[in-house]
Amino acid sequence: MRVSVIVPTFNEEKIIEKCLLSLEKQTFTDYELVIVDGHSKDRTVEIARKYVKEVIFDEGKGAAAARNLAVEKVKSEIVAFVDGDTTVPENWLEVAVRAFDKGAVGVGGPLRPEGGSLGDEILFFLMADLVRRLSSKFGSHHFSGNNCAYSREFYLKSGGFREDLDMLDDVEFSMRMSKYGKEIFEPKMVAVASIRRTKQKGHVTSIKSYIRGYISLILTGQVKKPEYLREIKKN
């Protein structure tokens, strides 16, 4: 079962290599690495080319558009997603593929913060683990875009990630994919993500913004990115 691991990037020179090294060490080996860059202004592409022969370029329309572009180009049965500021353990793909062996159309796991304080640990546990575990028990899956994998066949049938959403496009997509078959929240499929957003603006602000986003998505099908997220610099 072939997998394409898709990594959207933009100005990630300080952290991209750590991500790519973690993917290089996977125990599951039948996969290709696909990097989609939004025309980075730093050394991101230079570093990426040490790991892939070709970098795909998108027009800087965001991660959702980058993922959709890559999925159109690959041929693998499974497409998996990790962000450039995220690392995964050696068995990440192995655990993900087992879900598809069980007939799943999608799988996702929890996030852990890279470094940070006890507050970061609590925030990630609540928002990127506990909420997803509980929602999955009720058949409503809320996978993170930097820690998920899907059947490419059903990904294409669904129309892919919504590019008109400013945030929570990953949550909306995982909820929508459930109509095509079984999805699995896999606690062993752990990814470690950067805390730069919460570190820059604080835990309370982050939680309030995502709660408002969830409510807006559920009630209206739309969600506008909080202004502070527009100001986040890739550093």
Image (tube, helix red, strand yellow):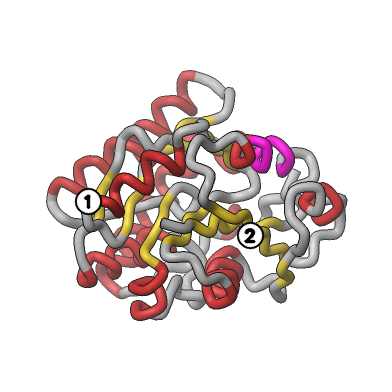
CB-based contact (under 8 Å), mark 2 and mark 1:
no
Q: Residues within 10 Å of mark 1 (few under 14, many from 20)?
A: few
Labels 2 and 1: the sequence-earlier one = 2
Residue 129 is covered by the magenta coloring = no
- Magenta highlight: main SS: helix
Kindly identify the residue that appears in the image at 64 percent across and 73 percent down: 61
Image quadrant assignment for residue 212? bottom left
Image quadrant assignment for residue 195? top right
Under circle 2, the secondary element is strand
Residue range highlighted in magenta: 16-21
Judge by depth and name the residue closer to the eye, 45 or 196: 45
Q: Residues within 10 Å of mark 2 (few under 14, many from 20)?
A: many
Report, in whole angstroms, how far the alpha carbon at label 2 lies from the one at label 1. Answer: 25 Å
**Label placed on residue 102:** 1
Disc 2 residue type (three-letter): Val
Q: The N terminus is located in which quarter?
A: bottom left
Foreground: disc 2 or disc 1? 1
Residue 174 in the image: above or below residue 119: below
Residue 54 in the image: above or below residue 88: below
Q: Is residue 233 visible?
A: yes
Could you tell me residue 169's position as x and y percent?
A: 43, 65
Kindly identify the residue that appears in the image at 37 percent across and 73 percent down: 153
**Label placed on residue 34:** 2
- Seen in the image, is 218 located left or right of residue 6? left
Under circle 1, the secondary element is loop
Residue 20 is covered by the magenta coloring = yes
Residue 27 in the image: above or below residue 105: above
Could you tell me residue 11's position as x and y percent?
A: 77, 53
Judge by depth and name the residue closer to the eye, 196 or 227: 196
Could you tell me residue 32's position as x and y percent?
A: 59, 55
Q: Is residue 201 visible?
A: no
Could you tell me residue 148's position as x and y percent?
A: 42, 52
